[in-house]
Amino acid sequence: MKKQPITIIIPVYKNYEMFFRYLEVNKKFFAGCEVIVMNDYPDQNITNEVNKIYPEACIVNNKVNLGFAGNVNKGVAKSTRDYVFLMNSDVV
């Protein structure tokens, strides 16, 4: 599979049931991309659930709530590709 120059950053805050359902639907579009899931709810670790759906994802569970901008910026800092695509967790 050809490595794409795109990192997909998915910021998540609560509403995990919907996020997991949509991650399952959207994963077919992620081929070759780096995917970073940014969980901004410190009380819930979502690593196991995300790994069951899309094990190629990098999952970051923040220890404190950074807010939307802080969460996204932290994801961008982790990106290793040339371009960043920000995808909200409720996108189908």
Image (cartoon, rainbow, N blue to C red):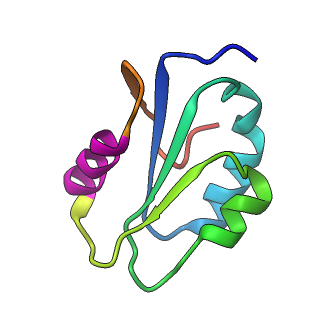
Q: Estimate the x, y position of residue 83 in percent, counting from the top left.
A: 38, 20
Instruction: Give the x, y percent position of residue 79.
Output: 38, 37
Question: Is residue 23 highlighted in magenta?
Answer: no
Query: In the image, is 59 to the left or to the right of 63?
Result: right
Q: Nearer the viewer, residue 8 or 56?
A: 56
Residue depicted at x 73% and y 49%: 54
Q: Quadrant of residue 48?
A: bottom right
Q: In the picture, residue 85 is in which quadrant?
A: top left
| Residue positioned 34% across, 47% down in the render | 75
Residue 71 location, x and y as percent? 29, 56
Please state, as top left, top right, bottom left or bottom right, where the N terminus lies in the image.
top right
Please identify the quadrant where the C terminus is shown.
top right
Query: With 62 as the anchor, is 87 left or right in this view?
Result: right
Position of residue 88 in the picture relative to residue 54 (left or right): left
Q: Residue at x 76, y 47 (%)?
A: 24
- Dominant SS in magenta: helix
Asked whether 29 or 79 is in front, the reply is 79
Check residue 74 for magenta coloring: yes
- x and y percent of residue 7 in the render? 47, 30
Q: What is the span of residues highlighted in magenta in the rendered image?
A: 68-78
